[in-house]
Image (cartoon, rainbow, N blue to C red):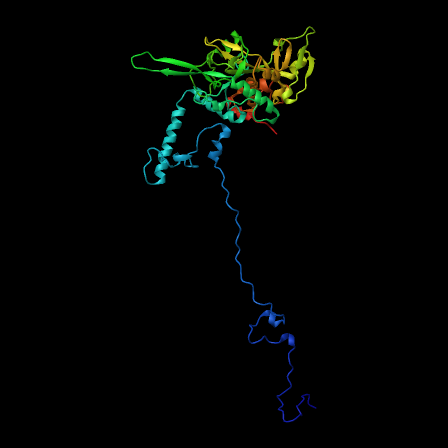
Amino acid sequence: MSLRRDCAEGDAQPWAARSIAPPMAFAPASPTEPVTIASSLGIANPGPAKPFVPFAPQYPVPQSVGSVVNDAFGDHYGYDVDPTGLFGKKKGAAAAAPVKGAKKGGMLSNLKVAKDKANATVRKAASGAKSGAKSLAKRASDLVTGLSHFDYKLYSDTFTALLGVAKKDDGINTDSKNNYAAFAGDSKYKKVVKIAQMQEAKMTHTESLQKNVKGRDSKVIKKKAEGRNAATLGFAQVEASAESKERYGDVIYPPAATVGIPTLVTLTVNDTNGTKGMLPITGLVVEALDVANITKGGDGNIAINMAEVKEIKMQASQEALTSDEFEFEWTLCVHGLHVDEQKNLHNGPMILVPKSNMNNVSAYGIATKNGVESALSHAIKGDKIDLLLLWTAFKLVQGAQDLAYASINSDQRKAAQELFGSLDGANNQNSYSEDVDADEFDELNAATIM
């Protein structure tokens, strides 16, 4: 028996076997549509593909920023110069001014001319006296310590003191742009500022002019003018001091004028604030307080009477301290220097600085025949010192505190540490740790280890 099944129906041929239709899931795609994997698997046509969108990063909008040169020479540091055209545009018509000596043409040739001129300037500066180099080093520490409104000198040989005077930008002339406005910038002292402005409105100074006429001897003519002299740091009652003349007499103007070296200016009787007995101060001395110079009561204690100051709502307070107790709290004093027309020096009253409250001007004291009283109270009344003198003394102390940490030479840093405390902390006031004395190690010695 054959296993083949022949077709027995009709006349169909044996090869015409019945075909089996494929399942609908594998139905061929429509002739109008291309064959795809989806159509082969019976998946509904998802429609046309979305168009390709290339990746396009969204960059932030460029922001205008200052240059390093602009920042370095900004008003914050006390420089009054514009950057060169290489790093930023100069102000006004100077922006388009070419470098003198530069030829038209390539930028490299112009850069070379500018470079040669810069090198010549550097060589000229380098050829100056050694004091010029010291001045540059001092200016570097200015930026660290905030002493940009003062020329100063640290004495560290036979005595320790800091002398500060109004800044002289060219070594000779003072400029009112370096002057402080007393008590400005703090809302707590709004009423005090008004009193300070009234005090300053009464100040006068001497204007002088050299008159040259052909056929006559030249002469200097003078007149009284409103406003304070730019060298004036305030007014105070003063008394003659032979010791100050011996210490600071060599810097009475005009010495060999050098930028950054403090000079004490002589002012005439026309420089006044309208109060009898108050004379102009052109120098401030910061030194360690000698308790022997403070008046004591019958019991040997020092009375501290801080009067009420209504303008800042400061309450009155009283206490009495032994000499040792007093020295724990009051470690520094500042006094003004007046130079008369005979080049003699006079000291103003001692303004006392509280160690724990150096940055609070209302806590400062003043030495009187009764002990210690409020410096702010006396300055408001204008009877021993005025508000301008108290404020400039305060600002000098504020700036000079950081000298103990600045990269100055070893002897000067030790003097600053003696005044303002060592690197070991404020509890070691008037003492300091040993360090490497060589000047090349100054920056390392001054570094604070965190």
Displayed quadrant of residue 383: top right
Q: Is residue 396 visible?
A: no
| Quadrant (top left, top right, bottom left, bottom right) of the N terminus | bottom right
Q: Give the farthest residue toward the left.
A: 215
| Quadrant (top left, top right, bottom left, bottom right) of the C terminus | top right
Q: Is residue 447 left or right of residue 176?
A: right
The percent coordinates of residue 184 (x first, y second) are: 56, 25
The percent coordinates of residue 377 (x first, y second) are: 62, 16
**In the displayed structure, would residue 108 be above or below residue 5?**
above
The percent coordinates of residue 378 (x first, y second) are: 60, 15
- Residue 413 or residue 121, whichever sits in front: 121
| Residue under the image location 37 percent in, 34 percent down | 114
Q: Give the farthest residue toward the top.
A: 298
Q: Give the farthest residue toward the bottom.
A: 11
**In the displayed structure, would residue 426 be above or below residue 46?**
above
**In the displayed structure, would residue 111 be above or below residue 280?**
below
- Residue 23 or residue 45, whichever sits in front: 45
Displayed quadrant of residue 358: top right
- Label count reads 0
- Residue 24 or residue 254, whichever sits in front: 254
Q: Is residue 38 left or right of residue 137?
A: right
The percent coordinates of residue 225 (x first, y second) are: 45, 17
Q: Is residue 293 visible?
A: yes
**In the displayed structure, would residue 300 be above or below residue 154?**
above
| Residue under the image location 50 percent in, 39 percent down | 65
